[in-house]
Structures are given as structure tokens and as C-alpha cells.
Amino acid sequence: MTQSFQIKDRHIGRDHSPYIIAELSGNHNGDLERALALVDAAAQTGADAVKLQTYTADTITIDVNRPEFHIKGGTWDGRSLHELYQEASTPWDWHEALFKRAADHGLHCFSSPFDPTAVEFLETLDAPAYKIASFELVDTPLIRRVAAKNKPMIMSTGIANLAEIEEACAAARGAEAGFALLHCISAYPAKPEDMRLQTIEMLAKTFGVPIGLSDHTLGSAVAVASIALGACIIEKHITLARADGGPDASFSLEPDEFKQLVDDCRMAHAALGPAATDRKGVGGANAQFRRSLYVVSDVKAGEILTEEQVRSIRPGNGLAPKHLDDILGKPAARDLQRGEPFAWEMIKS
């Protein structure tokens, strides 16, 4: 059984409504007002939190003209890492305003730090939690640095093998506040057929912590499906409009789509419930409309009952249909009228 943990007053675990994070990433397009509008939009969707990424191009990489520092293929083909991160980064002097706007809406706001200076900076903002990005999961010194702050942690597993995930978990266990893992396919966008959602159940059994999904597929179907497999956290990118462009816009949801994701994920969780061993529906109001045995034509006392006189029909006030063979061929104990629910006392013993 996987444990649960808390971010502020919000319990997170399989027994609780999914915790949904709106990832701003680089969809602010370099405009603080747009970034603040994204926080406003996230609040309107019903999300629990907004998440930032705290780095500069120089803290996450270096500007050097070597082949391995350039991206080949995919959404960002041909761009250098330094150029991409310079465009996508969220300026540190915006963070305080974004944290405050989120708090005004009652949203949690936290971030992914990418180096120790980012961790210390986020501490000055009293970040309630930390996210470790997929590409940083192998940076166990960074994870230990975060764990030392004793805040809840969420770690993505996108490109890590099981041994690397175990090493990250060992580093994170120093945080008494608890942590979760996110199943993730680090493709942008990811294809639904590559998502392998049953990994969620495997991670839960292997590591014994809450498991969620960091979802880069288009739409919300994959996120909703993950709830049935035990995902208790959903992280998804949000944008004001994909047509506006930006480094992550192509695989982000617009506000109305994000709201649908929130509603559908919460509905999916509510629909799971415990196994219905007590079959409550049997005793419900609609039980009266199940089939049962009825007199369907008038019968005289002593007359032998036939299939033309007693049938299984709706509603359900008569004997159960399984007793039909016990009744047919027996004499009627009294006159029977069409429309009477059949009862044992209607036949002679």
C-alpha cells in the first residue's frame, strides 16, 4: 500500500482526489503579464497548483559550439541548448509576483530547481514543495540538497532506469515530508501508444510511494486513463493559446481544455470507489423495474398454469424469474387476475 503525503493542506494519495499541476514552463513567451495571466487561467480551471522552472541558461548548460550542445530532431531541431533555455527560462525576478498571484487565487506555487542556487532562491519564497525534472533525476547531489529542506518532493522518471530511480529515491528519503514519483515519457509531444501507463502500477509496487503522471501527450485522454491505474498527481502544460507559439505550446492545453482535464480526472477518481461487493444497486429504487413473474391473463381457480398465463416481465414485484419452472403445470389456488404479481400462495401446494 503506497503512503500518502501533503503539500500544505492538500492530502495526496490514491484515496484522495488527484492533485493537478498546471506547468507554466516557457509558455509565458518572455512576457510577465502573460505569465501572470497563465496563473489566472490555471486558477479558473480548478487546478491545485502552478509550477515554474527555476534556472538560467548559464545554470542549466553552457554556451559552447560543440555538436552535443545542439538538438537534433523533434520540436526543437537545430537549436542550441543555451539558446533554447535562454528563451524558455522564467526570469527569477518574476518569481515573487507569480508566487503572490497564485496565493491570491488559493493555488499552490512551486518550482523545479536545476542547481543549488535555485534551491536557495526558492527557499526565500517559502516554496511549499519541490519538483525534480526527469533530466535531473540522476543528479543525486541536487536531490539531497532539496531533501535537506524537508519539503514535499515530486520527481519525474522520464528517462531513468529502475536503478537510477532507486538511487533518486534513496537521496529523497531524507525528506521526512515525503515524496512522489511521476511516470513520464520524455518526448515532446509524446505519443499515446508510447505511454505504457501500466508502469504506474509497477512503480507503486516497487517503490511504495504515491505515483502520478507527467503527461506530454496531446489532449487529456491519457491523463484520465492514468487515474484508473492509480495516478494521484497529474502534471500537464498550460498555455493561453497554442497559436501564440512558444517552446512548449505545441503539447500544451489551452484553458478550456485544461479545465476539461481537471473535471474529467476528478470524475474518473470519484467513479473508481471501492469494489461493489455489497452490490448497492440491487436495493436501489430501480430494483423495482427488474423482471419478475406476473399473471398476464386471467386464470380460474384450479386451472393448470401455462406460459401463456405466467411470464417474466417488468416490474419486479413478483417472484424471481428463476421460479418459473416451479410454477408452470401447477393448479391455481384461487382466481388470478391479469397484472397481479405472482406469489407462492397462488398455487396449490
Image: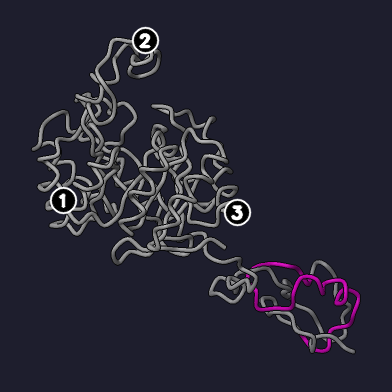
Query: Between residues 342 and 209, which one lies in front from this camera angle?
Result: 209
Q: Position of residue 226 (x, y in %)?
A: 49, 46
Check disc 3 and give the amino acid type. Answer: Lys
Above or below, 137 relative to 228: above
Query: Between residues 54 and 39, which one lies in front from this camera angle?
Result: 54
Mark 2 sits on what residue?
Answer: 67
Mark 3 or 2, closer to the camera: 2
Above or below, 248 relative to 76: below
Q: Residue at x 21, y 48 (%)?
A: 122
The stretch of residues the image draws in magenta is 309-335
Check disc 1 and give the amino acid type. Answer: Phe
Looking at the rendered structure, the secondary structure element under dot 2 is helix
Residue 99: image tag: 1
Mark 3 sits on what residue?
Answer: 205
In the rendered view of the protein, which quadrant contains the N terminus? bottom right
Left or right: 329, with 313 as reference point: right
Mark 2 or 1, closer to the camera: 2
